Image (cartoon, rainbow, N blue to C red):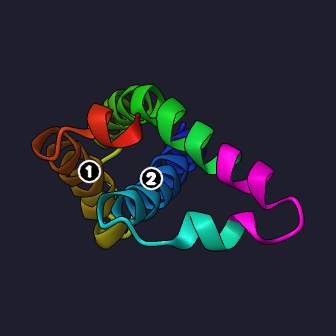
Amino acid sequence: MKKLENIFMYITLIWSAVMLAVYLVVLFEAPLFAWISYLPLGEYVCEFLTLLLLSGIWAVPVLYVITISLMIFVRTKSKEESQNKRITVFVIILPICLTVLMLLTNFMELLA
């Protein structure tokens, strides 16, 4: 069960970090997508990043709920504190910060 928790923690953390980076590029209107589109297969990369961002709107909250549930279940089941607390804090805080940022900046208009 501990390995499953770690897998979900890292997936949630990585997906949230990638979404935050891509969303900040969109939010500050950095010309990164224009530069990527000049590369060979750049249009496909841009479409993949857009798909990642749009699917992450639903996937990150689901991953977050599953991860938090697993973290609570494993913590109550085993009282070991061997897990890295920094990663746990980032897993809890990063998706919340991303959600707040997206809600405050009216993300649906930016992504349209």
Of residues 34 and 91, the one drawn nearer to the viewer in this rendering: 34
Q: Is residue 16 above or below residue 73?
A: below
Q: Is residue 30 magenta?
A: no
Of residues 40 and 23, the one drawn nearer to the viewer in this rendering: 40
Q: Is residue 112 above or below residue 78?
A: above
Image coordinates for residue 57, horizontal then vertical, percent = 40, 32
Rendered residue at 44%/55% (across/down): 13
- Give the structural element (helix, strand or loop) at label 2: helix
Q: What is the number of the mark on residue 38? A: none
Image coordinates for residue 15, horizontal then vertical, percent = 51, 50
Of residues 59 and 1, the one drawn nearer to the viewer in this rendering: 59
Q: Is residue 39 magenta?
A: yes
Classify 10 Å Cα crowding around label 2: few (below 14), some (14-19), many (20 and above): many
Q: What is the number of the mark on residue 98? A: 1
Specify the amino acid type for callout 2: Met
Q: In the rendered view, does 105 fall on the left or right side of 78?
A: left
Q: CA distance from mark 1 to mark 2?
A: 8 Å
Which quadrant, please, contains the C terminus?
top left
Determine the main secondary structure of the stretch shown in magenta.
Answer: helix
Of residues 110 and 2, the one drawn nearer to the viewer in this rendering: 110
Instruction: Identify the magenta region.
Output: 37-47
Q: In the rendered view, does 48 fall on the left or right side of 61?
A: right
**Residue 53 appears anywhere in the view:** yes
Q: Are marks 1 and 2 in contact (CB under 8 Å)?
A: yes
Specify the amino acid type for callout 1: Leu
Q: In the rendered view, does 74 fall on the left or right side of 42?
A: left
Q: What is the number of the mark on residue 19? A: 2
